[in-house]
């Protein structure tokens, strides 16, 4: 059994419902959801002229290897009718594989840990809520330390609630 963390985000339609639907589909796929963070409303990061997001992180337990797990997450996005209007643009559902055990994977279509998570309050805040002591396998420090570092910069502004 492996433990992984999945980031969930939505800024189109009924945002909370979209996250709940995705969690239901994850469970239906035989993936055990051990814990979910609270749902947090966050300012758009990257491309800022788009609606606010609801973000959350789920801790899961699975026997699926990372390459299969990511394909499963992509197929749930497709099932939910995800449209990609533009790169880094608005979407009804976004599922990211953030961490998978303490693996470091750098394949063309699969990078774990998520390569930009250390810069994203909308990832680190919910992650710290459920896994403050989890060690980032590349930086070698707990998530709580990464969040503190980030919050001491301009990004402190990013999180609304
Ligand atoms: N910004 C926020 N706040 N939440 C997201 O889930 C999110 N996802 C993205 C980009 C467009 C980078 N910005 C985001 O993919």
Image (cartoon, grey):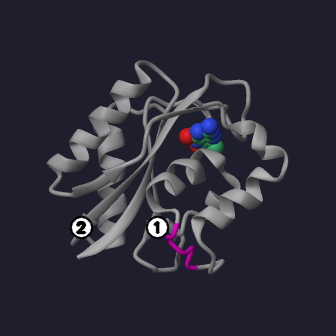
Identify the mark nearer the N-term, 1 or 2. Answer: 2
Visible in this render: residue 88?
no
Position of 156 with respect to 35 (left or right) is right
Q: Residue under circle 1? A: 99
* Alpha carbon distance from label 1 to label 2: 13 Å
Q: Main secondary structure of the magenta part?
A: loop
- Viewer-proximal residue among 133 and 96: 133
Label 2: which residue? 62
Kind of element beneath mark 1: strand
The residue lying at 57 percent from left, 73 percent from top is: 136
Determine the residue positioned at 72% across, 41% down. Answer: 46
Q: Give the range drawn in magenta.
A: 133-137
- On whether ligand 1 comes within 8 Å of the CB at mark 2, the answer is no
Image position, residue 128 (x, y; %): 53, 56
On screen, residue 38 above or below 104: above
**Label 1 crowd (10 A; few <14 / some 14-19 / many >=20):** many
Image coordinates of residue 122 in percent, x first then y, are 60, 44
Badge 2 marks a residue whose secondary structure is strand
How far across and how far down the image is residue 10, in percent?
48, 32
């Amino acid at each position: 059994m492996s433990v992984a963390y999945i980031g969930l985000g939505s800024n189109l339609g009924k945002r909370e419902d979209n996250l709940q639907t995705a969690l239901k589909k994850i469970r239906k796929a035989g993936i055990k959801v051990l814990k979910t963070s609270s749902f947090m409303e966050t300012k758009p990061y990257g491309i800022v002229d788009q609606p606010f997001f609801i973000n959350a992180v789920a801790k899961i337990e699975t026997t699926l290897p990372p390459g299969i797990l990511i394909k499963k997450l992509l197929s749930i996005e497709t099932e939910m009718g995800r449209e990609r209007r533009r790169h880094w643009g608005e979407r009804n559902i976004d599922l990211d594989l953030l961490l998978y055990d303490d693996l470091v994977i750098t394949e063309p279509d699969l990078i774990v840990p998520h390569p930009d998570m250390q810069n994203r309050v909308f990832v680190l805040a919910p992650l710290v809520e459920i896994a403050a002591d989890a060690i980032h396998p590349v930086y070698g420090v707990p998530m709580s330390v990464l969040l503190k570092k980030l919050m001491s910069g301009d990004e402190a502004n990013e999180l609304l609630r």
